[in-house]
Amino acid sequence: MQSIVEHDLGTPQRFSEKTVTLTIDGREVTVPEGTSVMRAAALSDVKIPKLCATDQLEAFGSCRLCLVQIEGMKGLPASCTTPAAQGMKVTTQNKQIADIRRGVMELYISDHPLDCLTCPANGHCELQDMAGVVGLREVRYGYEGANHLSAEKDTSNPYFTFDASKCIVCSRCVRACDEQQGTFALTIQGRGFDSTVSASQNVSFMDSECVSCGACVQACPTATLSEKTLIAKGQAEHSVVTTCAYCGVGCSFRAEMQGEEVVRMVPNKDGHANHGHSCVKGRFAIGYATHSDRIVKPMIRSKISDPWREVSWEEAIGYAASELKRIQAKYGRDSIGGITSSRCTNEETYLVQKLVRAGFGNNNVDTCARVCHSPTGYGLKNTIGESAGTQNFDSVMHADVIFVIGANPTDGHPVFASQMKRRLRQGAKLIVADPRRIDLVRTPHIAAEQHLKLRPGTNVALINSLAHVVVTEGLVKEDFVRERCEMPSFEKWRNFVAQEKNSPEAMEAVTGVPAANVRAAARLYATAGNGAIYYGLGVTEHSQGSTMVMGIANLAMATGNVGREGVGINPLRGQNNVQGSCDMGSFPHEFPGYRHVSDDSVRKMFEDAWGLKLLSEPGLRIPNMFEAALDGEFKALYIEGEDIAQSDPNTQHVTAALTSIECIIVQDLFLNESAKFAHVFLPGSSFLEKDGTFTNAERRISRVRKVMQPKSGYADWEITQLLSNAIGFPMNYSHPSEIMDEIARLTPTFTGVSFARIDELGSIQWPCNAAHPDGTPTMHVGEFVRGKGKFLVTEYVPTSEKVNARYPLILTTGRILSQYNVGAQTRRTENNRWHDEDRLEIHPHDAEERGINEGDWVGIASRAGDTVLRARVTERVQPGVVYTTFHFPESGANVITTENSDWATNCPEYKVTAVQATRVSQPSEWQKRFREFTDEQESLLKSADVFVAK
Ligand code: SF4
Ligand code: SF4
Ligand code: SF4
Ligand code: FES
């Protein structure tokens, strides 16, 4: 539990090996060169009054409250903008300074409402504090003259208000939006007394470019920008540091609490992944945890056409266990399995795979990473030796060229995108390879040097042609390759990519990218200094997903861009704990730490620890489970925190498989799409209700801390434990820290990890062991994890999903900032104000050919199925390509996607589906059936009194 007041040192930290020593009010202090006098003073416990300065933003020097006297300097300089210098002698308090400060404050207060007692900022308002600090006792100017006291409030944003009457025009909000967020949505309009803060061109916040990250709210020293929850509930009395449960950035937050109620989420300045920044989801979209749809009582039913029946935990667990045992006795050991989720903590996913391997006695466990980053695991393991990204996020600040492939960071990984944009504004060059014109291609003060607008499905052709340029134009870092890589594999690869068929000119017809652009991009990446690759699901979710990951690794190794800061191969993991769920052994073929189940010595270690024999053959992957279910061989499934009925491809195939399973046990917050096919519902807990850890895209393990009791009575790890005990495999953990201790004992890369150590260090990037006791920010330094880096030949094989006269367009999918994945959480928040339906983006040319206008209903048909979405006509997509998000179940985006998948990992080919689009006037047949089924399932829930109390 922490205090709710964070210390602010006034100006940002400076990093310099050179230091300067100065004297402030008689105290000697030594600071890195470039540090401001204000920060130096704060570090020596001398508080200088300030209003426009904060340590999250560069100093601006506008309020004049922080002035000081410096021996030998004229006038009274602002301490926030004056760098500390060797031998400087600073006086922060004397009569002259005090009088000026009081005068400044008097002017501010004369144009500020005196409603302190009822103001939401009362008690943490910096203006109020400073009035006290400078000893302001009277305001001589009165309130009759011109003032801003009746300025109108902007309440358009669902999460915060802008009360202009309280604004002191310190510009902290403007700078937060520019420097921290990089959206440049705010300006100061007018001059002098008439200056006001304005969103965009004087429109409401909701109508401006604002993306509701909240940085301006956090920066505001007054109540001008305030969270609506703070206004409604009043101030918190304690705070708890925890980790966001949305995306793979893994932002650290202080949950500010009143008892068991969250007042607001404030990004943690000490957060190693986010440094005090956040996006709209983590900061504001937590209302789902108490949404009226949230189920908090266990339920069972024998058939999916039966009404749900609320039962005790004992009965629910007993029924689930007896069904699992009955089915195994009847259909055999391998007829049951489990699915873990990247939404759950490491400790929870570890327990699910343990339950399956030890309790079910088979290896039929898989995770939703199957459908996103499984090719990353495969591709990186085989080339560089470890199934994870090579850097920390801060590494991007040392990159000279940033190559973004198949990722949309401003929507998918917004806080990291802000950091990346900061580096780009400092001058790093940008290359984007994406079929769509993502925002990053052109955003304020940033323009990509190259946007390689390739056709969906041609990634491998593109990476081979980039590599062709590197090897044929003498851009290979020969020393690095000779020293660090397997030379025979390199020679083989070099000969392969050097072939004329892989040249940009030859591949232009395949990729659609002009050869000159490919050549320019390859030269830039290979020669700019530090080249860093960031990639996302636009790389992995293809029939050649694993091949492309290997192609990326080949390119990075050939150009020497691995093993130091500023470079690397960086998969931007989608969900909060994708990295963790893979690390924890959620795949059917691997124990925790990516060790194959057929490895006798590893298996023995787990057998000894768990006290029973384990299987040496890999179990079923999710798609195999569906096949086996349709064949009548797979009959029971335990799903924790994952919604396969919405997220997996070819919905009709998935739902047919689910319908043929005799017992589905769903552990979740809501009656999600999969739960509509379930027989047992075990109410799960939100991230606010449990202890544990998440591992973000940087391999950073961070604590999730319980801020309230589980609303259903149990945290998810306890539910898995109850189930395991009921089926006869005893588990007896009393706290998740004990589960982590077991993980550390059994996993070489986690040996040094424990809750106590994470608490001590703030977070830990694995590997953390005797060799790396504080964790590993950059991997493969000096040597690859596998010893020598291995080049692999990446032959381009076109997908079998081809356009033809019947299906002439390619559909590709992605996500949007305000919604998250299947939307189960964000759809139950005000984030719907930004995005309340999935739309089909279509190029004006394709739209015109089909008579489709903006907002029209469009039927989209593929070989797998058809659905209907409204059109958004836009040049963001290229002709021949259409695009949609998949956040709303009724959109049926996955009714259209096919079962094509990555050759190595079965990761679905979400990014390439041949479709036709036509103007229609009514929902598709599937959508009508979906509506009927949903209505029926909701009615079967109606009589149960199982929802969270408001
Ligand atoms: S919420 Fe974020 S994007 Fe919006 S104005 Fe504030 S800082 Fe800018
Ligand atoms: S809104 Fe707040 S941060 Fe922005 S200028 Fe006004 S007082 Fe300063
Ligand atoms: S960037 Fe990701 S982790 Fe950070 S607040 Fe947003 S959703 Fe949460
Ligand atoms: S805090 Fe230094 S000028 Fe405002």
Image (cartoon, rainbow, N blue to C red):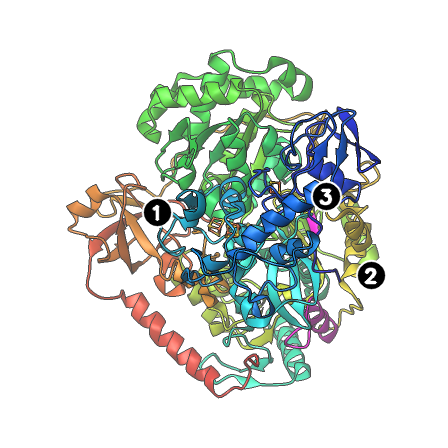
Residue sitting nearer the eye, 400 or 191: 191
Confirm whether the magenta stretch covers residue 425. Answer: no
Q: Secondary structure at mark 2?
A: loop
Q: Please state if 824 lies on the left or on the right of 709 as rendered.
A: left
- The answer to whether any part of residue 365 appears in the image is no
Residue sitting nearer the eye, 601 or 382: 382
Residue sitting nearer the eye, 319 or 873: 873
The numbered mark, 2 or 3, whose residue comes first in the sequence reads 3
Q: Please state if 938 lies on the left or on the right of 948 as rendered.
A: left
**Residue at numbered disc 2:** 611
Magenta range: 701-726
Q: Please state if 885 lies on the left or on the right of 276 as rendered.
A: left
Quadrant holding the N terminus: bottom right
Confirm whether the magenta stretch covers residue 711. Answer: yes
- State the CA–CA distance, disc 2 to disc 1: 68 Å
Residue 802 found in image quarter: top left
Quadrant holding the C terminus: bottom right
**Mark 2, mark 1: which one is toward the viewer?**
1
Residue drawn where x is 77% and y is 53% of the image = 743
Q: Amino acid at mark 1?
A: Gln
- State the CA–CA distance, disc 1 to disc 3: 43 Å
Q: Which mark is residue 201?
A: 1
Q: Amino acid at mark 3?
A: Lys
**Residue at numbered disc 3:** 95
Local packing at callout 3 (Cα closer than 10 Å; few below 14, some 14-19, many 20+) is: few
